[in-house]
Amino acid sequence: MDLLEKYNSVRKHSLEICAPLQKEDYVVQPVVDVSPPKWHLAHITWFWEEFVLAKYYPGYKWFHPRYTFLFNSYYNAVGERVLQLDRGNMSRPTVDEILDYRQHVDECMNKFLGGIPQSAINLVELGINHEKQHQELLYTDIKYILGHNPLFPPYRSGFSESQTNEVDHSFITMSEGKYTIGFQGNGFSFDNELGVHEVSLPSFSIRKSLVTNGEYHEFMKAGGYKNPQWWHSDGWEWVIENNIDSPLYWYSIEGEMKRYSLAGIESIDPLEPVTHISFYEAFAFAEWKNMRLPTEFEWEVASDYFAWGKRWEYTNSAYLPYPGFTKEKGAIGEYNGKFMVNQMVLRGASVVTPKDHSRKSYRNFFRPHLRWQFNGIRLCKK
């Protein structure tokens, strides 16, 4: 597939994800970390306009002079922007105006890609993969929006959040030794995967299966959310301050524990991998089981020996640069590097991750209290 086909395919899919929504759903922002679907559609369009068309397309005319301010996400080098918390306050521009904006940019990009200069190819590849990241965020943000609506409307009936259950809870033992870490394949990767290097690891044992809903429910029934001995100090403060007593989207309805999924309210399958938990909760569960979370390096070297891809899997590794990491000059250099503080690494992929982002070197990262992504727990023996 050439760049033009890739571009049009990814742009089409962003709209397909939003197709089940009503227009009212496009504007809602329940919390700061969740962006309205309308904002996502506009931001990924702005990325193409700001970084590709404005630089490489001769005579390009900006669609609207204020859209850079409205739809810049975190690029300080580009200029001022709307505060993240205020994205849901923008009733204007309308959804229809955003769709017109997308059409304008798509028309120009299709002309541009017909004769793209060599110097722009890597940037276009980054833009395609940037939009795919926002497609995953669209799924999780839409789930948060609908999952906090008192009517619990389904996003799409029959949407499966886990294709298989976890039944093999045995452990794999990896030998002590030196292992190679980092992206080693062909094709696209993000800069935080680069810097292939060796790490020395002691022998360790890692579980083949993810922690299930049933196992996590046992933690809850055993008073896991009431006993500070299992928790980091920060995690315990988070539990108390926010009155946390279960994973996100778990609700007690008429005496039975249910959960909201993208298919609507449903019973909890005890064999399905638990999801929508924070790093704090993952760590506390592991402590309660007298286990631990793997490091990101342990996860990567062992990943060939177990199935993964249903949940982003917590590691006990802080998000830090690999040896030799360098940032690009200008705004594009802000893409990953500036977030390498106060974040924890997750590995693998989830049920809503684009297929070509599902690779063992991919380094996802979030602050330890966040749980709106499809994340889960894999245990190591202490």
Image (cartoon, helix red, strand yellow):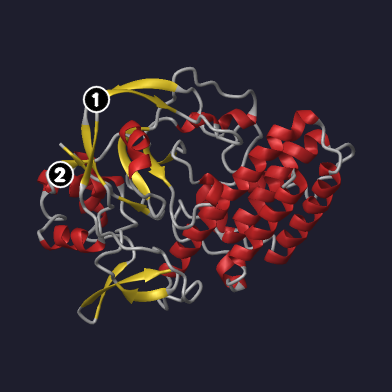
Callout 1–callout 2 Cβ contact below 8 Å: no
Residue 1 lies left or right of residue 135; in this view the side is: right
Residue furthest toward the top? 324
Task: Indicate the quadrant containing the C terminus: top left, top right, bottom left or bottom right.
Answer: top left
Q: Position of residue 114 (x, y in %)?
A: 85, 43
Q: Residue at x 43, y 53 (%)?
A: 350
Q: Pointer 1: what residue?
A: 176
Residue 307 appears in the rendering: yes
Residue 312 lies left or right of residue 85; in this view the side is: left
Q: Position of residue 215 (x, y in %)?
A: 19, 59
In the rendered image, the vertical position of residue 14 relative to residue 108, given as above or below: below
Mark nearer the viewer, 1 or 2: 1
Q: Pointer 2: what residue?
A: 287
Q: CA distance from mark 1 to mark 2?
A: 24 Å
Mark 1: amino acid: Glu
Few, some or many residues within 10 Å of mark 2 (<14, 14–19, 20+) = some
Few, some or many residues within 10 Å of mark 1 (<14, 14–19, 20+) = few
Residue 4 lies left or right of residue 292; in this view the side is: right
Q: Residue at x 33, y 37 (%)?
A: 302
Mark 2: amino acid: Glu
Pick whichever, 204 or 56, lies toward us.
204
Pick whichever, 358 or 131, lies toward us.
358
Q: Which quarter of the picture shows residue 319?
A: top left
Q: Residue at x 51, y 60 (%)?
A: 139
In the rendered image, the vertical position of residue 264 relative to residue 181, given as above or below: below
Q: Check disc 2 and report its element: helix, strand or loop.
A: helix
Q: Position of residue 325 (x, y in %)?
A: 50, 21
Q: Check disc 1 and report its element: helix, strand or loop.
A: loop
